[in-house]
Image (spheres, grey):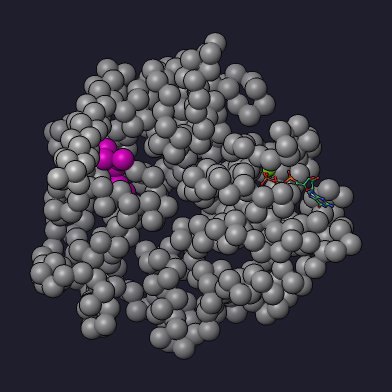
């Protein structure tokens, strides 16, 4: 009899793990976190609850909604009554492709709140970001609206032309290909993240860091057993929450490093929360087991208190005791990473305009604005027109993690880009547009909008100041 992890089934059913855990607990299934496993039989029972209705037009999100509607207590939590009544009666026809802005307008929902909801679903999107069918279903569920998605094939060329700027392709399942998994290494300061990555990469970054503290995100690609993997190193110092949040946004799997002589600490907990919120699988590396004062069992106990029960304690959380310094058990850890990555079947469409996220950026004296991007979908090429928030540009040069110039960056590649007109903000969503003029025009529009907002904010502040003084 097979098993499936909660977060995987949740993804399949377009639910959050939290929602699925509630449903499972109602069915008296013992689950504690998104990493818990459930029997295939139980998964089937839940799947059957979500089978599409016979006329084929009703979507999963509506079924979830109906369940919620029967629960009076939850209704109280979802907001005011007017909107609830609207939710239960009104259904919105949505034609694909559709952008965040268009969806916000058509269902009359604030675009900013929608972007926040999307972030909660692990997607960094801007107003012009196109939404695919799966995301739409999850988003509708999050917002609590009913939608009817119209068949993509019936969208005419004219309609398509009128549509938004941004990638014109909505990925079809047939276009998707396996891409390297993106693994983020997280954990409390000094617990050994960079040392672990140094061992994996056979490099010596940790030794050269000022004060032994990582102050930026490092992104690298490594071949393990012939398979390419992208690793992201994050800083553990408490000051770098935003960087860790960015790392969590782009990742497929988290390796959480916990030092056996120090145990679960504040940034360990922060990382657990990031991974839980984004439904990302966690693999625990209990590090520094070579130290005489190492207490791996204490770490396991503390993890249990945070809902992560180790496999050898009857739970579902993969824990590998390692010593990054003495290079012990590193292969065992990597095997686990490959195993989880394989189960995830992480895919992207390399034959489309690239999309990615700025993980770091700076103004270099000699080279101008430099941004390190992680390409999440599509392939980035020299000459591509770029749009990142209010900044546009054209890819002049691309440099990979080994310092080599490259002409193409397929999905999951970390790449340094030269050619932005200004420094794009770290965390910004980046997209390639078909035309540089268009990119420039959209960037200009956004800049104006931001400027306008600044003026409004400033005048509001001065009015408030004035009232305070009266
Ligand atoms: P930040 O990036 O600043 O959060 O730190 P980090 O988690 O990357 O830790 P780093 O790899 O820089 O290691 C911190 C210290 O712990 C260094 O002195 C390492 O040599 C040491 N260290 C790392 N792994 C081990 C280990 O397995 N055993 C022992 N004894 N020391 C280790
Ligand atoms: Mg480090």
In percent of width and height, residue 161 lies at: 18, 31
- Where residue 322 sits, quadrant-wise, is bottom right
Which quadrant contains ligand 2? top right
Q: Position of residue 7 (x, y in %)?
A: 49, 66
Give the residue displayed 64% in from the left and 54% down from the top. 187
The reply to whether the magenta stretch includes residue 106 is no
- Magenta stretch bounds: 126-132
Which residue is at the far right? 292
The rendered magenta stretch, by its main secondary structure, is classed as loop
Task: Specify whether 406 is left or right of 165.
Answer: right
- Residue 374 at x, y = what percent? 51, 36
Q: Residue furthest bottom?
A: 28
Tally the marks. Answer: 0
- Residue at 22% over, 26% down: 448
Res 427 → quadrant: top left
Quadrant of the frame with the C terminus: top left
The quadrant of the picture occupied by the N terminus is: bottom right
In the image, residue 287 above or below residue 211: below
Look at the image and tell me whether residue 92 can be seen: yes
Which residue is located at x 54 percent, y 39 percent?
412
Does the segment drawn in magenta span residue 129?
yes
- Residue 229 appears in which quarter of the rendering? top right
* Residue positioned 14% across, 37% down in the render: 159
Question: In the image as oriented, which residue stretches furthest toward the front?
Answer: 470
Position of 249 with respect to 163 (left or right) is right
Instruction: From the viewer's side, name the closer residue of 28 and 427.
Output: 427
Q: Is residue 141 above or below residue 25?
A: above
Question: Does residue 219 appear in this view?
Answer: no
């Amino acid at each position: 009899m097979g098993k499936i992890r909660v977060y995987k089934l949740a993804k399949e059913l377009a639910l959050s793990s939290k929602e699925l855990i509630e449903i499972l607990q109602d069915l008296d299934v013992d689950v504690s976190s998104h990493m818990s496993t459930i029997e295939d039989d139980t998964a089937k029972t839940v799947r059957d609850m979500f089978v599409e209705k016979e006329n084929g037009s009703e979507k999963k999100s509506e079924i979830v909604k109906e369940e919620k509607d029967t629960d009076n207590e939850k209704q109280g939590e979802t907001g005011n009554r007017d909107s609830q009544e609207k939710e239960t009666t009104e259904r919105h026809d949505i034609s694909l492709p559709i952008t965040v802005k268009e969806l916000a307008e058509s269902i009359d929902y604030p675009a900013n709140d929608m972007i926040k909801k999307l972030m909660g679903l692990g997607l960094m999107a801007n107003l012009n970001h196109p939404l695919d069918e799966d995301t739409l279903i999850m988003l509708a569920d999050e917002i609590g609206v009913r939608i009817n998605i119209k068949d993509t094939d019936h969208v005419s060329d004219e309609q398509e032309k009128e549509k938004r700027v941004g990638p014109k392709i909505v990925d079809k399942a047939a276009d998707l290909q396996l891409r390297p998994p993106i693994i983020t290494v997280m954990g409390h300061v000094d617990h050994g993240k960079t040392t672990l990555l140094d061992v994996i990469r056979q490099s010596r970054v940790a030794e050269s860091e000022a004060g032994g503290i990582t102050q930026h995100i490092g992104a690298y690609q490594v071949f393990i057993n012939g398979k390419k993997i992208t690793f992201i190193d994050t800083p553990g110092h408490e000051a770098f929450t935003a960087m860790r949040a960015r790392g969590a946004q782009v990742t497929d799997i988290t390796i959480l490093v916990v030092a056996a002589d120090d145990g679960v600490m504040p940034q360990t907990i922060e990382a657990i929360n990031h991974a839980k919120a984004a439904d990302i699988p966690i693999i625990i590396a209990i590090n520094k087991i070579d130290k005489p004062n190492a207490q791996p069992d204490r770490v396991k106990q503390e993890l249990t208190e945070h809902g992560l029960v180790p496999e050898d304690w009857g739970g579902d959380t993969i824990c590998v005791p390692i010593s990054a310094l003495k290079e012990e058990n590193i292969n065992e850890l990597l095997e686990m990473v490959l195993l989880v990555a394989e189960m995830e079947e992480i895919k992207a469409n390399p034959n489309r305009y690239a999309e990615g996220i700025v993980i770091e950026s700076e103004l270099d004296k000699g080279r101008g604005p430099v941004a390190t991007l992680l390409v999440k979908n599509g392939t980035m090429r020299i000459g591509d027109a770029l749009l990142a928030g209010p900044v546009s540009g054209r890819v002049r040069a691309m440099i990979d993690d080994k310092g080599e110039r490259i002409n193409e960056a397929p999905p999951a590649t970390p790449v340094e880009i030269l050619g932005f007109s200004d420094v794009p903000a770290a965390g910004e969503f980046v997209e390639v547009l078909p035309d540089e003029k268009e990119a420039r025009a959209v960037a200009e529009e956004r800049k104006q909008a931001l400027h306008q907002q600044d003026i409004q904010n400033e005048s509001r502040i001065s009015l408030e100041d004035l009232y305070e003084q009266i």
